[in-house]
Image (cartoon, rainbow, N blue to C red):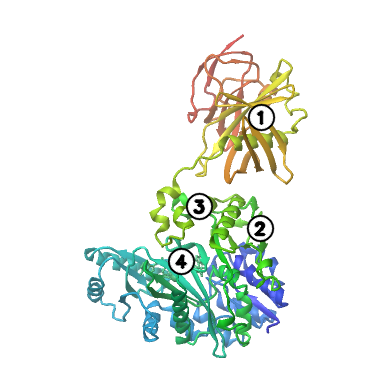
């Protein structure tokens, strides 16, 4: 076994590999870019080498620089993770030339599977079933068109060198073929530097089912069962599970054996995944082989109790496979959800930013406790693989994955329920995430019943994106509780606003709190008012003209609050970021922005109240209407300029007779905003 290895990757997979190294007593070396100087994977390793600028091309894709780092640190082997250089023949070759072990398959196997077309030719020879299609060398446009016509529409055009869901075109009709071919070739050439294409029958409502295989240098080859990865967006996986639900033992064995045959056909060594596409009636066809560890490998680890990174290291160190086919057993069911910083409602566009608050469900990181594995009773039911910590930034340079959430259960139902609870416990403030979207898929009928196919998200688009009813009132009550706490009040003690005499009314007091709702889209609603009142021991909140009893207290944990409003009650967590209150309650995330009217009013009082705009800007709230009786300092209008808010307070007591601007209006410096009839 090795003493020291270099991990040529970043993020969660680098941390994942480092965890196994630590457990096995192998020293690990991280490499990092400028953007990753303080990244989690750097601290997860024993040593770290800076390899260049922030873009992948300047760092994680620099073959020479990485080999040099391995040499300089005395690493005997390099683990490439996935993505980046993991399926790069030149890199594997360069490692070999430098006398460093590449923890992956032989160069020839990478090359054989690197071209989807060539791989299909090989698989055909090995009697592995293929989707009807054309994968020949002749790329003559007319010939391709003729082949597509013969296969029958719809057909799928794929870039032979493609990956990551790129370079694919569905063609519905013969007359659309020439244009689709031209565009597929263009994308293939620009993304993969090779415009070769292949054509496949486009299966309708297929499932993506794949098989984990492993082979050693001593003639051993096994499959570690199957995974279903049908839930995809843009042909990229979102939720994965093992074993693939609803398949007969016979089909599973046939697929496993076909996958092993595929691996043997290319003299495979190490971890690999053979991807199949499966029809509704259970016919399966070879799609491609990924010659690396797969993102979703943890679900296989969860059901087999094996550490696949350990297997990779052992095989790379020339050891035989740890277990035979007969010794491998499936225990229960596992599901993985990929938590991404992205905007599902905006076509899943990546989102970036600092993770101001990050809370994952209770679970273990990278469960690879050898003692626990294989002993179902001790297996952790929730595993979190994450490459970031609170305070880290999701940059535009790399994959925007925040974490993988993996759950295990004795049955699929148990795993599903656990996944639902785990997703509800995720809290992220900063970038947008797909957490809520994942919750909805997990709760959706087709997913819950295991009615899986690659069109699930698209077909259920309307239901998955329909507006949901959020626990608005409960969240608002929790936000008010957090605000009262922050401003120095306690559940039973004095209010922070006691000192301000103009809020007192007959011995009790009332306080008007201005809030904006911040929508998931980032849009804000106009200010709405909530009136908090205390009269003796009774507290009330008035919202939307309804006054209800209000009680609240601090919960036991950090950021935790309890509140009741009328007969609704909620326990939740409120993360306060400046004047923005992020509320996580009842499985929902809501955000409110506090309009600090009082501070502004106090400012206004300290200076002079006015009726004119102190700067050019936009009206974001009008707090009074004609007929409102105001005291000196009462907030009248809130303006915003240069991202700063400014509240205009009444210069004197009186009655508002006219409001000259509305929310959203742009106002010039010095413009008169309202008319006040001074008492
Ligand atoms: P897998 O097949 O392992 O589940 P995917 O199909 O999601 O992974 O992606 C295919 C490959 O492309 C993986 O190796 C993944 O790491 C890589 N990949 C996907 N998106 C990116 C990205 N934005 N930057 C770098 N690599 C990526
Ligand atoms: P990549 O290298 O980008 O992962 P794949 O060949 O593995 O490309 O295909 C990616 C996804 O595209 C599959 O998981 C599946 O959802 C869909 N797909 C691929 N081939 C077909 C096909 N013949 N019919 C229908 N869908 C397909
Ligand atoms: Mg694929």
The mark closer to the camera, 2 or 4, is 4
Location of residue 314 with respect to 169 vertically, above or below: below
For residue 207, side relative to residue 331 (left or right) = left
**Do the residues bearing badges 2 and 3 touch, measured as CB atoms within 8 Å?**
no
Q: Residues within 10 Å of mark 1 (few under 14, many from 20)?
A: many
- The reply to whether the residue tagged 4 has its Cβ within 8 angstroms of ligand 2 is no
First along the sequence among labels 1 and 4? 4
Circle 2 sits on which residue? Answer: 389
Residue 662's spot in the image, x, y percent? Answer: 48, 25
Residue 22's spot in the image, x, y percent? Answer: 71, 73
Residue 248's spot in the image, x, y percent? Answer: 45, 71
Tell me where residue 610 sits by quadrant: top right
Q: In the picture, which quadrant includes the N terminus? A: bottom right
The mark closer to the camera, 3 or 1, is 3
**Spatial distance from mark 2 to mark 4, Cα to Cα?**
37 Å
Residue 550: give its label.
1
Q: Residues within 10 Å of mark 3 (few under 14, many from 20)?
A: some
- The residue closer to the viewer here, 2 or 659, is 2
The mark closer to the camera, 1 or 2, is 1
Tell me the SS state at disc 2. Answer: loop
Which residue is at 54% across, 90% downward?
A: 219
Circle 4 sits on which residue? Answer: 246
Tell me the SS state at disc 1. Answer: strand
């Amino acid at each position: 076994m090795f003493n020291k290895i270099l991990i040529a990757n970043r993020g969660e997979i680098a941390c994942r590999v480092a965890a196994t190294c630590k457990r096995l007593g192998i020293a690990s070396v991280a490499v990092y870019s400028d953007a990753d100087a303080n990244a989690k994977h750097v601290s997860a390793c024993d040593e770290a080498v800076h390899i260049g600028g922030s873009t992948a091309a300047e760092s994680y894709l620099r073959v020479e620089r990485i080999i040099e780092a391995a040499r300089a640190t005395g690493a005997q082997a390099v683990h490439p993770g996935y993505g980046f250089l993991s399926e790069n023949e030149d890199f594997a070759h360069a490692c070999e030339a430098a006398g460093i072990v590449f923890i992956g398959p032989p160069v020839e196997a990478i090359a054989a599977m690197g071209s989807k077309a060539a791989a299909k030719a090989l698989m055909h020879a090995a009697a592995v079933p293929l989707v009807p299609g054309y994968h020949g060398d002749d790329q003559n446009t007319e010939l391709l068109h003729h082949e597509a016509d013969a296969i029958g529409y719809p057909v799928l055009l794929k870039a032979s060198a493609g990956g990551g869901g790129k370079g694919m075109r569905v063609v519905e009709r013969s007359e659309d073929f020439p244009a689709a071919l031209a565009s597929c070739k263009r994308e293939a050439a620009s993304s993969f530097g090779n415009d070769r294409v292949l054509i496949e029958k486009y299966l309708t409502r297929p499932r993506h089912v794949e098989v984990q295989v492993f082979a050693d240098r001593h003639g051993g080859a096994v499959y570690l069962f199957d995974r279903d990865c049908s839930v995809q967006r843009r042909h990229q996986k979102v939720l994965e599970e093992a074993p693939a639900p609803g398949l007969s033992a016979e089909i599973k064995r046939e697929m496993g054996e076909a996958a092993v045959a595929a691996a043997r056909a290319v003299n495979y060594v190490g971890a690999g995944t053979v991807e199949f596409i499966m029809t509704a009636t259970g016919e399966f066809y070879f799609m491609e082989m990924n010659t690396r560890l797969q993102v979703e490998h943890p679900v296989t680890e969860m059901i087999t109790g094996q550490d696949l990174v350990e297997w990779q290291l052992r095989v790379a160190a020339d050891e035989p496979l740890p277990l035979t086919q007969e010794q491998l057993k499936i225990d229960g069911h596992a599901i993985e959800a990929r938590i991404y910083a992205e905007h599902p409602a905006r076509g899943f566009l990546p989102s970036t930013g600092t993770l101001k608050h990050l809370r994952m469900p209770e679970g273990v990181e990278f469960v690879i406790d050898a003692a626990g594995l294989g002993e179902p009773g001790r297996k952790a039911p929730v595993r979190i693989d994450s490459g970031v910590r609170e305070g880290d930034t999701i940059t535009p340079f790399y994959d925007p994955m925040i974490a993988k959430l993996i759950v295990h259960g004795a049955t699929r139902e148990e795993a599903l329920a656990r996944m639902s609870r785990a997703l509800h416990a995720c809290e992220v403030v900063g970038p947008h995430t797909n957490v809520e979207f994942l919750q909805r898929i997990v709760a959706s009928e087709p997913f819950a019943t295991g009615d899986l196919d690659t069109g699930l998200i698209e077909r259920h688009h309307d239901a998955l994106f329909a507006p949901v009813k959020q626990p608005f009132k409960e969240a608002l009550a929790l936000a008010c509780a957090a605000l009262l706490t922050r401003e120095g009040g306690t559940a039973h003690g004095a209010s922070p606003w006691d000192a301000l005499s103009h809020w007192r009314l007959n011995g009790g007091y009332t306080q008007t709190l201005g809030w904006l709702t911040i929508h998931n889209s980032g849009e804000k609603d106009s200010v709405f008012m909530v009136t908090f009142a205390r009269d003796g021991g009774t507290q009330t909140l008035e919202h939307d003209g309804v006054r209800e009893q209000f009680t609240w207290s601090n919960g036991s944990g950090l950021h935790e609050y309890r509140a009741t409003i009328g007969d609704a009650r909620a326990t939740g967590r409120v993360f306060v970021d400046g004047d923005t209150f992020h509320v996580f309650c009842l499985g929902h995330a809501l955000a409110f922005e506090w309009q600090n009217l009082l501070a502004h009013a106090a400012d206004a009082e300290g200076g002079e109240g006015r009726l004119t705009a102190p700067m050019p800007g936009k009206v974001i709230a009008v707090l009074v209407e004609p007929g409102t009786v105001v005291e000196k300092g009462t907030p009248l209008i809130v303006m915003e300029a240069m991202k700063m808010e400014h509240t205009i307070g009444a210069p004197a007591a009186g009655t508002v007779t006219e409001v000259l601007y509305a929310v959203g209006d742009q106002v010039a410096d010095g413009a008169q905003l309202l008319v006040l009839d001074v008492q």
